[in-house]
Amino acid sequence: MTAVRAIAGTSLRRFLRDRSNYFFVFVFPMILVVLIGLQFGSESASGRALVVGGSDLAGRVTDALEARDVQVARADSVADAQERIARGRADAAVVVEADDDRSFAAGEPTDLAVITGTSTDAIAVQQIVGQVVAGVGGTRVAELALVDAGVDDDTAREALAAASGTGPTVVVSTAGGDGLAEEFAGLGEFDLGAAQQVSLFVFLASLAGATSLIQSRQLGVTRRELAAPVTTGQVIAGEALGRFAVALAQGAYIVVGTALLFGVDWGDPVATALVLTLFCAVSASAAMVFGASLDNENVAGGVGVGVGLVVAALGGSMLPLELFPDTLRTVSGVTPHHWAYQAYAEISRRGGGVADVLPQVAVLALMTAILLPLGAWLLRRSLQRAL
Amino acid sequence: MDQVLDCAGLVRRFGDLVAVDDVSFTIAPGETYGLLGPNGAGKTTTISMVAGLLEPDAGAARVAGIEIGPAAVDAKRHIGLVPQDLAIYPDLTGRENLRFFARLQGMAKDVRESRMGEVLEVIGLVDRADDLAKEYSGGMKRRLNIGIGLLHRPALLVLDEPTVGVDPQSRNAILESVEALSGEGMAVLYTTHYMEEAERLCDRIGIIDHGSLQAEGTRDELVRLTGEVDRIDLAGGGEVGAAAVALGDLPGVHQVAEDGRTITLTVVDASAVLAEVVSTAAAAGMSLADVEVSQPDLEAVFLHLTGRALRD
Amino acid sequence: MNLRAIVTMTGSDLRQRVRDRSVLVFGLAVPFALMVVFNLLFSGVGSTEDFEATTIAMTGTADQLGSALQVTFESMSVLPATVDPASSADEARTAVVEERADVAILVPEDFSTQVQGGGSPEVEVVRSGDGSLEEDVVIAVTDGFVDRVATASRAAAAGGSVGLDSSAVSALAGEVAQADQLVTTSPGRVADEQLSLQGSLVAGQTALFMFFTVGFGVIGYLQERDTGTLPRLQSMPMHPRDIIVAKTLVSFVLGLVSTSILLTAGSLLFDVDFGSVVPIAVLVVATVAAATSLVLVVTKVARTAEQASTINAILGIALGVLGGAFFPIGGGGWLSRLSDLTPPAAFIRGLGITSAGGGVTDLAEPLATVAGFLVVAVVLALVLPARQVEA
């Protein structure tokens, strides 16, 4: 145990000596959490729409969209709307030409062009636009029917507006009370981003840090360690422990930092700590497998960042798992991110406790139990190769 | 221009630190000149100016009559620099390393290839020429490192501490090849903090400390500077400091240097004062473990000139 | 300027970078893997695969409006649906929980009466929670139906409030309920330069990794300082400036090659057409030059090669995220204006323009952005004092 602790301590000290690590591990993730929070948080899940035209119809469409929590902005022209959508600045645009407004006022069939982008929100926004436009049309039909009955247009409008609370409504609920619609309901501005970023950065930084294991071998330190009465298992355990400590510090920092700075609600602290700890253990073990299987430090740094990004994307750290196609969601089960994501969701969205995340925790523990011995075996083999 | 190298009043500062202060010396064709001094004395900075890596703040170095500096391309052609650190590319083979630097030297293709063959022969890497340099042993890397400096037959070969961290066998091989090159008429500038190497290789030696040249000349000329005194080294424990003070008062003792465990004395005639030195040291409370008497050498010269031992 | 020496150093560096495989991994393999993963992820979102037949458990089918809704469901053109009448709300809910029905519609037994009486009854849609698109369709249809009923009852209420008699009111309600949809939508023309999802992925990842790839050249300068080869290079018969020129050239060549390969392979694999070669080439050259100039600044600031790599990676990811390499920066605020100034944003936008058939002159705006970035970076690189290394 002394040997393991000594190796872990040295690994940790080497990490702390390099100042640039601090930025990568501590400052940078926070910046990204803020950026992603700003992006997805403030502009609620209902998306962003543009309305072209300043007429009565345009105004009615705008009000109706806003009533459905869509963020609406005015576009100066069709070209302006097209450009903003092409650049991903909005999800869809409703074009109201002067002709449209005239035929709408006259109660003649009116067809509005809707420009849609390629963003993931675009389809949902398009659907909302369709419903909203139908509703606006229905109201106009009612107004005109009142006019036909001898009421003047302004009075008809006011009377209809006053009656806006009348009539049946639709409510949507979920059987069992736990579905996608309610998934994101309780989430604050930064909640989603923070949970995903924790996994992404802890794993990525661990893999990138695996270069220290390669350095140790290149400098001959590992050989020297093994010349002492120390086994490869102990070397791996020591190096992994050092990595684990860094990962845990980083993870805890992001959790506490986002909770204090941005009011992210992480839910039950004990359960969160448990999931984070297990995730850090998997990350550290994965880093050992990685560091033992590659010999070139420069290549390893690059591959580490690359693999870290790809695995994170696959594990739901870039796009919520709930939005994955079914097959891919199954595939993503091989990533630790997947299980951590589900566990955090259980804790922060549904108020779960330790007992509720035990399945996910068990999977993470199993991953560690497989990766760590694999790392030791690979390290033993790597020492038989010339570096 | 009968001198290969002519340094006149070289000065180089780094911020407030004057690393090299008014250093002047010359090297003639076929001559091996040693710069001897402890680590941090200014050897590498001097060499960096001579090899055109650094612009001097004052003074000038002329190689084959041309003033050298970072932009002095023509002067640089006459220089072969062997840096202290291994200056080879691990991901290239030995031959590729040689070819790369030969091309940078502007050597024409036919000359280049035949010359590379010769150099590989000299450094004993013909068999391994096409292996990656990272697969070489430490000694092979060192030899390749030196070989690159010889490619273009420079008028002046500059070797910066080429034997630091080298095993005795390789070290001897390096010293022999320097002697051979010198025999062929190449001028060599050699820095070291090993006095034995300087004594063995160098026709003339400059002693450098705190950035300035303390003395220069042949070995014998330098030794004469000490007044041809002998040296007594006392090693042991106890009251070493008190013993040093007491010994300083003895007649016939020129200089005393003390580092906590050993005392080094320069004396006119060791045999005349030895008995008194030993009894004085013992009386002052020093417990003697070892006493050594030596004839003057460069170490003594350095001590005489700077008041401290070479290997501080 | 010693051209021969510069070419020699550039060639030797390129050979070494290929040999240690770092560029291949970071410049090609990783961005390509990310493109594939992202494509798998995003193209699955909202895909219009064929809808599966859906069973709806429904109450209130005996009611007049309820049965009209049932007919509406059974005649949906996009989605084949069967309606299972249920006798109570609990029965319908249980059917969903036990997966005998995909979704339940709870219409009150006296729905029509309540509506006619000017009340506000609720129709409840109970979904299974698996987030299927079929559910969304059923919800949308229910919404549309109830909306129309609500409009009619609002018309009736309004008619009553302005003093129409009851026969006029019911005629009014009937007229509104029967009316065709007044306002409809149809797909508008998207901008020609709008990249497809795959197009944005290829452009974004290429722009992001350009910054990593160019790092392998210029940062090599610091590496040589760390490994000790720099003094030897400086002692060679050439101007010291030639060394940094060669390293810059290495960055530039690596950036050009990897960017070209990524764009070509990406457009072939994902069937994206970025337009004609000449304007794309101009855009690539300009953006790679800007990325290279940034690495020059990094090299001036960093003390070791490792530090430079880290700073470079941080700047690369930051610029990539800000420039919309992962997702576009939305809104019209300062963040999106800042985003516009980054080379990745200009690059992605430029590729949109070329994909729409734009030529070099159409690229004026993105090119000006990139040029501005380049000038600022080069000036910084020249003005910043080099870290002095004591010899």
Image (cartoon, grey):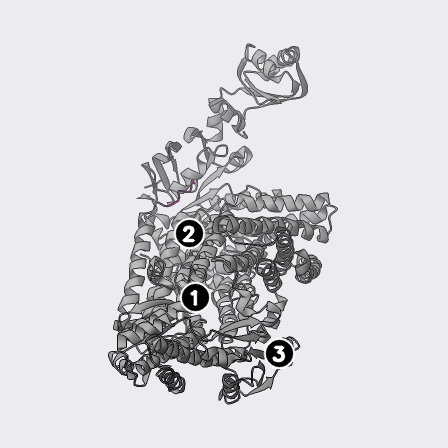
Is C72 located above or below residue B307 in the figure? below
Mark linked to residue C327:
1
Mark 1–mark 3 distance (CA, rounded to whole Å): 47 Å
- Residue corresponding to mark 3: C88
What residue span does the magenta drawing correspond to?
A: C386-391
Labels 1 and 2 touching (C-beta < 8 A): no
On the image, the x and y values in percent for residue A384 come to 68, 58
As helix, strand or loop, the secondary structure at mark 3 comes to: loop
Which residue is drawn at the image coordinates 55% and 71% (left, top)? A173
Query: Between tags 3 and 2, which lies in front?
Result: 3
- Residue corresponding to mark 2: C233
Which residue is drawn at the image coordinates 66% and 58% (left, top)? A382
Q: Nearer the viewer, residue B95 or A177?
A: A177
Give amino acid for label 1: Phe
Q: Nearer the viewer, residue B185 or C260?
A: C260
First in residue order: circle 3 vs circle 2: 3
Mark linked to residue B221:
none
Query: Between tags 1 and 3, which lies in front?
Result: 3
Mark 1–mark 2 distance (CA, rounded to whole Å): 44 Å
On the image, the x and y values in percent for residue C263 come to 42, 73
Give amino acid for label 2: Leu
Looking at the rendered structure, whether the residues under marks 3 and 2 are on a common chain is answered as: yes
First in residue order: circle 1 vs circle 2: 2
Q: Nearer the viewer, residue B203 or B63?
A: B63
Q: Mark 2: few, some, or many residues within 10 Å (few <14, many ≥20)?
A: many
Chain for numbered disc 2: C
Give amino acid for label 3: Ser
Is B286 located above or below residue C80 in the figure? above
Dominant secondary structure (helix, strand or loop) of the stretch shown in magenta: loop
Q: Quadrant of residue A196?
A: bottom right
First in residue order: circle 1 vs circle 3: 3
